[in-house]
Amino acid sequence: SNNANAVTWSALALTGLPASYKMNGIVADASNNLYIYLNDFFSGTTDVYKVNSGATTANKITNLQFGNDIRQIREYGGEIYVLGYNISDNKYQIAKTSNGASS
């Protein structure tokens, strides 16, 4: 049987995101925290935001070593991985949460 119509969706009313943006991707870690990867149209940057499990406030992650050239975000084995251009090394690199995405 087809239960596709049995799924109920509701929009999350998130706060803390830029005024104008394009969302490129979203992943969740093992603790159900959400990570949003987006282009901020006003600042011209590509950023990652974290929404803690059960919360609706998005907080910009500022300790990535990448400039404004983030290309992907993925979850694997409960860890969050980000692909971006490291401006200090002048090459693309992958960053991984070092604490299991706990903070």
Image (spheres, rainbow, N blue to C red):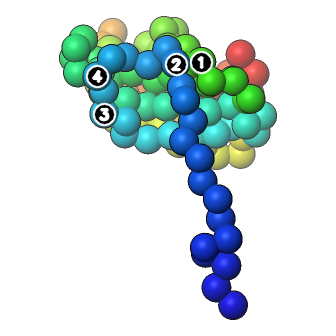
Mark 3 residue element: strand
Label 4, label 1: how far apart the Cα atoms are: 16 Å
Mark 2 is on which residue type? Thr
Look at discs 2 and 3 and give the one toward the viewer: 2
Q: Which residue is mark 4?
A: 20
Q: Which residue is mark 3?
A: 22
x, y percent for residue 12: 57, 36
Label 2: few (<14), some (14–19) or many (≥20) C-alpha neighbours in 10 Å: few
Mark 1 residue element: loop
x, y percent for residue 5: 60, 73
Label 2, label 3: how far apart the Cα atoms are: 15 Å
Look at discs 3 and 4 and give the one toward the viewer: 4
Mark 3 is on which residue type? Lys
Which residue occupies 24% across, 11% down?
43
In the image, farthest residue toward the bottom: 1
The answer to whether mark 2 and mark 1 are in CB contact below 8 A is yes
Q: Is residue 54 above or below residue 44?
A: below
Which quadrant is home to the C terminus?
top right
Compared across the picture, whether 91 is left or right of 81 comes to left
Q: Which residue is mark 2?
A: 15
Mark 4 is on which residue type? Ser
